[in-house]
Amino acid sequence: MTCVSLLGHGYNALQARMGKEGGQEWQEEVSLLFAPSFKKIANGEVLVAKASDLISQIDQCRALTGPWTLEVIYVIPAKDNTSCTIRYVLRSEKAGDFDVIALLKSQNGTHIDQIDEVYYQLEMDAA
């Protein structure tokens, strides 16, 4: 498994724990996984402009969506090992289910520099 693939799996594992557990102290894990200048973009909107803001963004999201789980479909590294494409399904208690495609970028292979995610709302069952 490549370095960037490991970062992708680490990102998904952290997201899954944050969605399940909430209210934990994540700062040490965030500083190990993300570059200080980390940027998170979702559906074209910059949500986080530095790693230190990630935890509050996730907490705000969890307040709106409730707990969530992740089902990772694939993590595919680029040939140059500076990015990978991640696809996963996020199932949230309040907001429903989303099919997510994410592009993770890492120039040095040790920290995530940027995540660009696109969320597609999956059909909710009709009552």
Image (tube, helix red, strand yellow):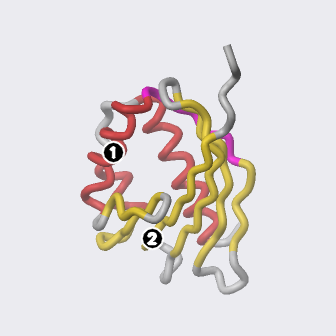
- In the image, residue 25 lies at what x, y percent? 29, 40
* Residue at disc 1, secondary structure: loop
Marks 2 and 1: which is nearer the front? 2
Judging depth in this view, the residue of 95 and 73 nearest the camera is: 95
- In the image, residue 7 lies at what x, y percent? 55, 63
- In the image, residue 87 lies at what x, y percent? 68, 55
Q: Which mark is residue 114?
A: 2
Residue at 57% across, 30% down: 96
Residue 59 magenta? no
Q: Hey, what amino acid is under mark 1?
A: Trp
- In the image, residue 42 lies at what x, y percent? 46, 58
Give the class, few, some or many, for how many residues have Cα within 10 Å of label 1's Cα (few <14, many ≥20).
some
Q: Is residue 84 above or below residue 25?
A: below
Looking at the image, the residue that sits furthest to the bottom is 80
Left or right: where does residue 39 sit relative to residue 82? left
Q: Hey, what amino acid is under mark 2?
A: Gln
What range is drawn magenta here?
66-72
Q: Is residue 113 above or below residue 15?
A: below
Cα distance in 3D space between marks 2 and 1: 18 Å
Main SS class of the magenta portion in the image: strand
Residue receiving disc 1: 26
Q: Is residue 122 above or below residue 120?
A: above
Left or right: where does residue 5 sit relative to residue 51? right
Residue 69 magenta? yes
* Residue at disc 2, secondary structure: strand
